[in-house]
Image (cartoon, grey):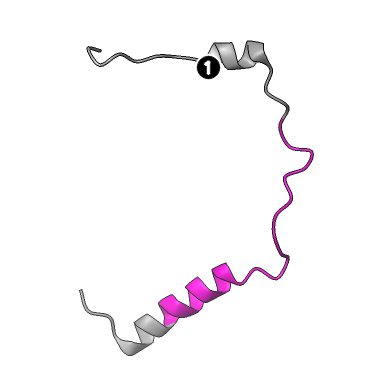
Amino acid sequence: MRFSGLGLLACLTVTGAALADPSGPVSLSGIGRPATPQTLALWDIDVRADG
């Protein structure tokens, strides 16, 4: 697949705009909850090689 110069410029512009977030890093404080041993036990699954 060949890109024209204008197509390549458009791709680079969109990529640059997506990567240049002026708001800075996203803070995840206040999202989620601490993992308890009971919660981890619910997610603790083992898959053996024989299926």
Name the residue: 37% across, 87% down: 6
Q: Position of residue 36 (x, y in %)?
A: 69, 17
- Residue denoted by label 1: 43
In the rendered image, which quarter is residue 21 located in? bottom right
Other-residue count near label 1 (Cα within 10 Å), few / some / many at <14 / 14–19 / ≥20: few
Q: Given the image, on which type of amino acid does mark 1 rest? A: Trp
Toward the viewer: 35 or 15? 35
Q: Is residue 6 left or right of residue 25?
A: left
- Figure quadrant of the N terminus: bottom left
Q: Position of residue 42 (x, y in %)?
A: 56, 12
Q: Position of residue 17 (x, y in %)?
A: 57, 74
In the rendered image, which quarter is residue 2 located in? bottom left
The magenta segment is 10-32
How many dots with numbers? 1
Instruction: Please say whether residue 20 is one of the residues in the magenta stretch.
Output: yes
Q: Position of residue 8 (x, y in %)?
A: 36, 81
Name the residue: 65% across, 10% down: 38
Toward the viewer: 26 or 49? 49
Name the residue: 57% across, 11% down: 41
- Figure quadrant of the C terminus: top left
Name the residue: 72% across, 26% down: 34
Q: Is residue 37 left or right of residue 43?
A: right
Instruction: Please say whether residue 17 is one of the residues in the magenta stretch.
Output: yes
